[in-house]
Image: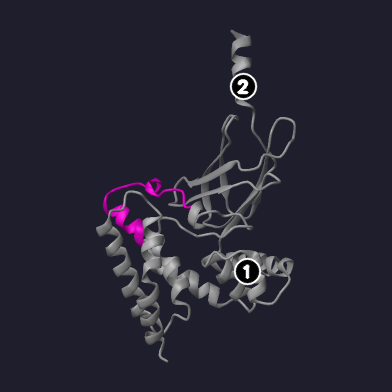
Amino acid sequence: MSNRSKIGKWLEAQHGKIRKWASGMSHKLDAADVDDIVQTVSLELLEKDSKIDEPEAFARAVTPYRVYDVLRQRVRAPQSLESMDEVGELSTSLNLPINRFHKPNSAKEQCLDLWRAIGQLPDPHKAILVQRLVEGNTFAFVAAQNELPESTARHYYARAVEQLGRILKCVRLSGAVTDDDAKSLSSAEITARGVKIAEYRRTLTDEHGQFSMVLLQKGQYSLRSKKTGYKDDVRYLEMKKDVQLPAIVLARADQTVEALEGSA
């Protein structure tokens, strides 16, 4: 069976997935926009008939770029994109699927660069990375598919992400969030916005208050940490290499109010 036939058959049966991914990324897309995105992604798949082994993985990776193209044509900022945690697209913790979504000068070339880099990885690292990073499968599922213990699958995935970052010359940001009593804060929202680069990431801290953002472009970032009931922490970072932040301490909002009342 030719690769084009494989892609054509996948589109016949699964093109609805592209529609679901696109419509779930922004409430500002109407039905016509989604139809255009489905058509564009489908044509890109067919044009790459000799280069794509995983049609679904490629379609899932390129769809966010096409969504951004539509929003950009309306002169909307990247913030127009809704949080995509529900569909597993944007979180960047090593324990969750990630998507290297940003505002590239040439989205198609950036996407192909990513796939070329993934192609340089050895197996089983490459297979595990695609199954987890692109397809969004759980580590338990990935481990079962590769007949490995889950801890081994996690290790291979972490190593694959590190190797991919070196190939693409990207950096990693990690840290932890606590309160004034040094108690870990889970589900704190961490957002990183490029200052002079078009990069935007969002993730949540895990049960230990830790977070990790991988495959970041090098440059300056505004980092905001927030959690309900606490005062936001905003800081600026220069990301020239991997950065492990000291604990980010969030003060309780009620303590801030009490301090202001006391000074008055």
Of 20 and 128, nearer the camera is 20
Q: Residues within 10 Å of mark 1 (few under 14, many from 20)?
A: some
Q: Residues within 10 Å of mark 2 (few under 14, many from 20)?
A: few
Q: Residue furthest top?
A: 264
Which range is magenta? Answer: 66-84
User: Residue 170: percent from the left, percent from the top?
Assistant: 56, 60
Of 142 and 204, nearer the camera is 142
Secondary-structure class at tag 1? helix
Mark 1 or mark 2, which has the lower sequence index? 1
Disc assigned to residue 207 = none
Q: Residue furthest front?
A: 13
User: Residue 207: percent from the left, percent from the top?
Assistant: 68, 46
Q: Which residue is mark 1?
A: 141
Q: State left or right for residue 186 relative to residue 65.
A: right
Q: Residue at x 48, y 57 (%)?
A: 87
Picture mark count: 2
Depicted 261 relative to depicted 162: above or below: above
Q: Amino acid at mark 2?
A: Asp
User: Residue 174: percent from the left, percent from the top?
Assistant: 64, 50
Of 36 and 17, nearer the camera is 17
Q: Residue furthest left?
A: 32
The N terminus sits in image quarter: bottom left
Name the mark nearer the viewer: 1 or 2. 1
Secondary-structure class at tag 2? helix
User: Residue 81: percent from the left, percent from the top?
Assistant: 40, 50
Q: Residue furthest bottom?
A: 1
Depicted 240 relative to depicted 255: above or below: below
- The answer to whether residue 71 is magenta is yes
Q: Which residue is mark 2?
A: 254
